Image (tube, coloured by chain):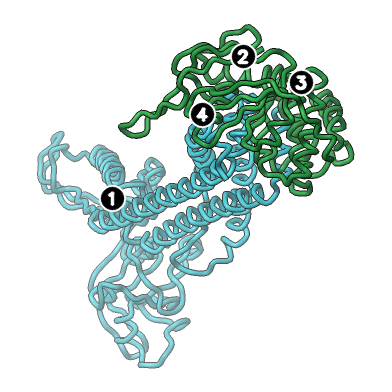
Chain colours: A green, B cyan
Amino acid sequence: MIEIKDLHKSYQMGSNSLHVLKGINFSVKEGELVSIMGSSGSGKSTLLNILGMLDEADTGSYFLDGMPIKNLNEKIAAKYRNQFLGFIFQSFNLITYKNAIDNVALPLYYQGIKRKERIEKGMHYLSKVGLADWATHLPNELSGGQKQRVAIARALASEPKVLLADEPTGALDTKTSYEVMELIQGINDEGKTILIVTHEPDIADMTKRIVNLKDGVIIDDTIVKQVKAAAYV
Amino acid sequence: MFNIERWQEIFDAIGKNKLRTFLTGVSVASGIFILVLLLGVGQGMQNGIAKEFESDASNSIWVWTRTTSVEYKGLNPGREIIMTNQDYDFINRKNEKYLEYKSSRARDWGIVVSYKKESGSYGVEGIFPDFQMIENEEMISGRFINQNDIKERNKVVVIGNKVKKDLFKKDKDPIGELIRINDIPFMVVGVFHDKAGEREEDRVFVPSPIAQQIFSKGQGIDGLAYTLKPEKDFETAVRKSQEFVASMKGYLKEKHVISPEDKRAIGVNNSLKGAKRFYNLMFMIKTFFWWVGICTIIAGVVGVSNIMLIIVKERTKEIGIRKALGAQPGSIITMILQEAIFVTTIAGFTGLILGLTLLEFAGPMIQTNFIANPSVNFNVAITTVLILILAGALAGFFPAWRAVRIKPIVALRDE
C-alpha cells in the first residue's frame, strides 16, 4: 500500500540546513496497523506529513497504492488527500460550529456528494463509532473521547485507503485512550491500513508493527504481538 | 455562484455563526448608514450655504440708451435713442432661458413729492415687481409693487427710508397714507431700505405704466435691469451673460438702426464681481464636501477591510481542517468570499435604506439656515455601497488567499 525509498527531507533554518529525514526506506502492506515511534525531533511527524501529502520530500520516491506521489500542486494534493487519506489529529480538529454529523459528512462535500447522501453516509460511520445518538451535538458538548470518535468517523467517511493518525490519544486519559485504540483496532480488523504516530509505548504495543525512528533514520522495525485494547477496557 | 450545495454550506456557516454574522452585519450597516447621513448632511449644507449667498450670485445687467455717435444708413449722429415697452417684451421673450429677474425703468429726477405740508424733490422710478430682487431692496414695512398694481394700474408708491424720514414725523406709520407726486395722489404701500445707504433711499417706486403716464413717456422706457439665472460655475455664468448681452444689443441696434460700430448709443453695465465671489465660495464648499465624502468612503473601506481580515484570521484553523479533508484552495476562497459578500451586501443595503429613510423623514424637519433639504444622490449612494462591498471582498481575498497557501499542518496548529 505504501512504498517509500530513500526519502530525504531537510528544512532551512536561517543559514543552517536541518536534515530531518536521512534516507527512509519503508513499506506498508494493505491491512497493516503500524505505529511510528520516536522522541521529539526524530522526524516522525515530518514523515507523517509527507505520507499525508501535507509536505513534500526533497528526494526519494513515495508510492501510494502503486501511484507515484511527486510534484504535487495544491489542487492535486487536495484531491488525493480527499480520495486516499483519512486524518486523525491529536487535537481532534473538528469544526467547532458544525455538529457531529456535519463534521463527519464534510469530506463527502469535497467529493461532490449530494447533501442527502452525505448525511446518510455520515450517519452510517457515526453509528459505527457508537455516536449515532450524538449526531446533532456540537463538538463542545462532547467529551474528549467522543470528539476523537467523531474525528475517526470523519476520517472513515471518505473511505480512504490509509488512515493516518498523529498522536490520536495524546490529549486523552488512559481509559479513553484504550477505548479509542479499541475502535482503531476494530477498524483495522475490518482490513483498513492504519498508521499511528505515537510516543506512548502502551499505545504502540496495541499495533501490529512498531517502527522506531531516531535522528531521521529507522533504527528498528519489528512485527509485534498485538495487545488487544479490549482487555483493558 | 449558483452552486446550490455551496450555498447550503454557506448558509450553514452563517446560521451557525450568528454572532459573527450579526456583528459583521451591524458594523457594515452602521458604517454605510453613517456614510449616507454624512453625504446627506454635506449636500444639505451645500444647499443651505448656496441659498444664503445666492443673492451675491446675482449677475445683474443694466441697460440704458444715449444719443448715437456714428452716422449710419443716412441717419446723423446725435440722434436720441429711446427704448419702448415692445423692446422690453421682445427681449424678455427671446432670452427667457437666461433671465431670472427682469424689469424696465421709466424714471425722472427732481420730482416734487409731498405729504401734507412737507415736501421734497426725489427720483421717481416706474418699475416691475422683480426690481426688488434685482436691486436687493429690503422692505422695512409694507410690501413692494406687485403684479396686480401693474395690471390694475394702481396709483401706489413704495418710498425709500430717507423719503419717509423727510416727509413723515418720526413715529408716523406711512403705510396707507396718501402722498402727492406731481400733485397726483398715490397711496404708500411700503418703505424700503437699501444697503447702499441714503443715496439709494432717496427715491420712490411706482408701477411702470403709471410712471410712463404721469411723465408722458408714452411707450418709452429709460432703461432695463436684469439678473441672470445662477450657473454651476463662474465660467458658464460669464459665457451666458455675454451671450445674452450680445443677443440683446444686436436686437436693439437693428431695431433702432444703430451702427454696429456705435459704442455710445447703448450702455450696458454687467456686474460679475459679486458673482465671482459666490462661485469661488461654492467651488470651495463643493471641494470640501468631496473631500469629506472621499475620506468617509476611505474610512468605510478600512473598516470593512478590517472586519474581513479578522474573519479570515478567525477561520484559519477551519481552513486548515478543510484543506486536510481535501478542499481545493479555490473552493475555500470562494466559500469565504461568497459568504462575506453575501453578508456585506445584505447589511450594506439595509444600512443604505435606513440612512435614506432617516434623511427622507428627518430632512424636512431641520430648521437652520445653513442646512437645506439634505439628500443623497441615489446613484452616488449605490456606488458607495458597491465600492465598500468590493473593497471588503478585495480585503477578504488577500488574507484568505494567504491562509489557503499556508500548509494545512501550520494552519491546524493555529489556535
Looking at marks 4 and 2 on the same chain, the residue that comes earlier in the sequence is marked by: 2
Query: Residue at (60%, 34%) from the top-left corner?
Result: B319
What chain is tagged by disc 1?
B
Which amino acid, by three-letter code, is at mark 1? Met
Query: Residue at (70%, 28%) from the top-left corner?
Result: B6
Picture quarter containing residue B182? bottom left
What chain is tagged by disc 4?
A
Q: Is residue B278 left or right of residue A109?
A: left
Q: Position of residue B403 (x, y in %)?
A: 52, 34
Q: State the residue position of label 1.
A: B83
Q: Are discs 4 and 1 both within one chain?
A: no
Q: State the residue position of label 4.
A: A214
Q: State the residue position of label 2.
A: A27
Q: Residues under labels 3 and 1: Cα distance?
A: 92 Å
What chain is tagged by disc 2?
A
For residue A159, which numbered disc appears in the image?
none
Q: Please state which of the two labelled residues, at mark 4 or mark 2, is closer to the viewer.
A: 4
Q: Residues under labels 4 and 2: Cα distance?
A: 18 Å
Q: Residues under labels 3 and 4: Cα distance?
A: 42 Å
Q: Is residue B66 left or right of residue B336?
A: left
Q: Residues under labels 4 and 1: Cα distance?
A: 115 Å
Q: Secondary structure at mark 1?
A: strand
Q: Which is nearer the eye, B79 or A76?
A: A76
What chain is tagged by disc 3?
A
Which amino acid, by three-letter code, is at mark 2? Ser
Q: Which is nearer the eye, A103 or A64?
A: A64
Which amino acid, by three-letter code, is at mark 3? Ile
Q: State the residue position of label 3.
A: A113
Residue B2 appears in the rendering: no
Looking at marks 3 and 2 on the same chain, the residue that comes earlier in the sequence is marked by: 2
- Badge 2, how many Cα within 10 Å: few under 14, some, many 20+? few
